[in-house]
Image (spheres, rainbow, N blue to C red):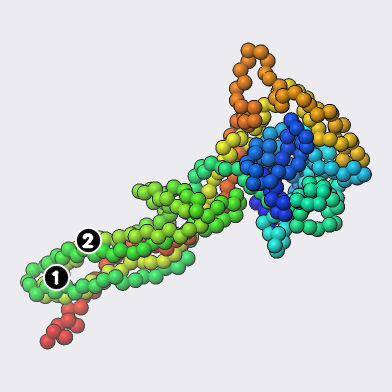
Amino acid sequence: MILPYIPPEGIYFRLLGLDSRCCIYSRNHKQPEVFHRPLSFGDFEDEYFTLVHGTGKHSGLYAIKSRATGKVLYSCGGAKSMVGHAPEDYNHRGRWFELEPGRAEYRGNFRLKTPSENRVIFSRITPDPVFHNESMANHSREHYFSFIFEELQFEDIEFDVANGKITYSKKRSIASQTLVNDSSQTQQFHIVVGEKRDQRSLLASGNGYPIEKSVKFRANIPVIDDYGEIVIDSTEVHELTYGVTDTREKWHRDTHLVTVEPHEVVKVVFSVSQGEFTVPYTINFSSKTTAGPSAALYRGGRDSAAYSSTGSAQQGCSHPQAAAPWKGPYYTPPPENVPLPFPPSTPVSTGAKAQTYTKGVWRGNATWRLRSEVTNVTEVWRRFAL
């Protein structure tokens, strides 16, 4: 099984049901608080979540935390099984999920399982209930979800030229010329040689944050210099299209000074090196809205326990007793005369931005090292000339 890309905490996403084409949401101001909504309805703030990576006994598991409410999802079994959300307390088993990757037709999707509860979440259009959980032993298309990531901000591309490799190379002749000096004095010839070649490169698909093809970046790219070394071309910023081969014309042009002694004939052969090379790359992104694990939401002064999902505590997966639906405003206003520093649903940056990356291999071909080789062919030339 191929694991889906697992984003770090602070990178937000929506959870889209494969069968239902609906996204899970978490909200406080209206029932149902945790449910799903058709993707076609639009993009809603309450549909965004981030993963809290488990450690210790929860290693390999993830808590799913809402950006809008700050609560984490749970999926409980028992006599009154349910899917809901609760305050950020990670001691309850039903709040730790395994993202089980799909195979074959489900590749790129995953099931949201709570192993401690033996439950898996499903999302479907019919029959009722359309959003709930059931035994992990069952298997259905309705169990599968995929990530729809928030729009991230491109930071930079790092090319690891130290680990770049020339995978193939050969010397290719591009021109030759015979120079005759029938005089009694040494002569010098200035020869200008040039060639135009197409050079191709590809920012090949990598592993990590999934980048859509046709996304464009601007960067200085790797080249092979005249000494046969892989370096970064600092003279020009190129526009790259991810997953698409880029073709550019490059001129190789140089002037060579060739000295021919009296009554001698020389042959000058001009050649270049031509080949292919690879360079590992890392494309760095950051969240436009969050500052990673240290990000916080302004949620006012109301105790978040009052927002617990409907349902009572049960054995093996206890959660706060449900409170009556709150009829007041979602956010408690700040104290009088203290201005609200940011929109209520906007995450606050309290540290470095949450970052993620894609790693892959840059592939290119190149022509380099235009050089000349001079050979004295006086005897051969004279023989044929007579």
The residue singled out by tag 1 in the image is 261
At mark 2, the secondary structure is strand
Figure quadrant of residue 28: top right
* Mark 1: secondary structure: loop
Above or below for 62 versus 167: above
Q: Is residue 305 left or right of residue 155?
A: right
Residue 21 rendering spot, x and y as whole percentages: 69, 50
N-term mark: 2 or 1 = 2
Q: Can residue 88 be seen from the camera position used here?
A: no
- 158 vs 124, nearest the viewer: 124
Which mark lies nearer to you, 2 or 1? 2
State the CA–CA distance, disc 2 to disc 1: 20 Å
Image quarter in which the N terminus is found: bottom right
- Horizontally, residue 235 falls left or right of residue 348, namely left
Give above or below for 358 relative to 155. below
Residue drawn where x is 38% and y is 66% of the image: 274
Numbered mark located on residue 20 in the image? none
Residue nearest the viewer, comparing 132 with 380: 132
Give the residue type at disc 1: Glu
Residue 248: quarter of image: bottom left
Number of numbered discs on residues: 2
Position in image of residue 76 (x %, y %): 85, 43
Instruction: Kindly check if marks 2 and 1 are in contact, taking CB atoms under 8 A apart as contact.
Output: no
In the rendered image, residue 334, in percent from the top left (x then y), is placed at 67, 18
Residue for badge 2: 255
- The 10 Å Cα crowd at callout 2, few under 14, some 14 to 19, many 20 or more, is few
Residue under the point 67% across and 40% down: 48
Q: Most extreme residue toward the top, as rendered? A: 337
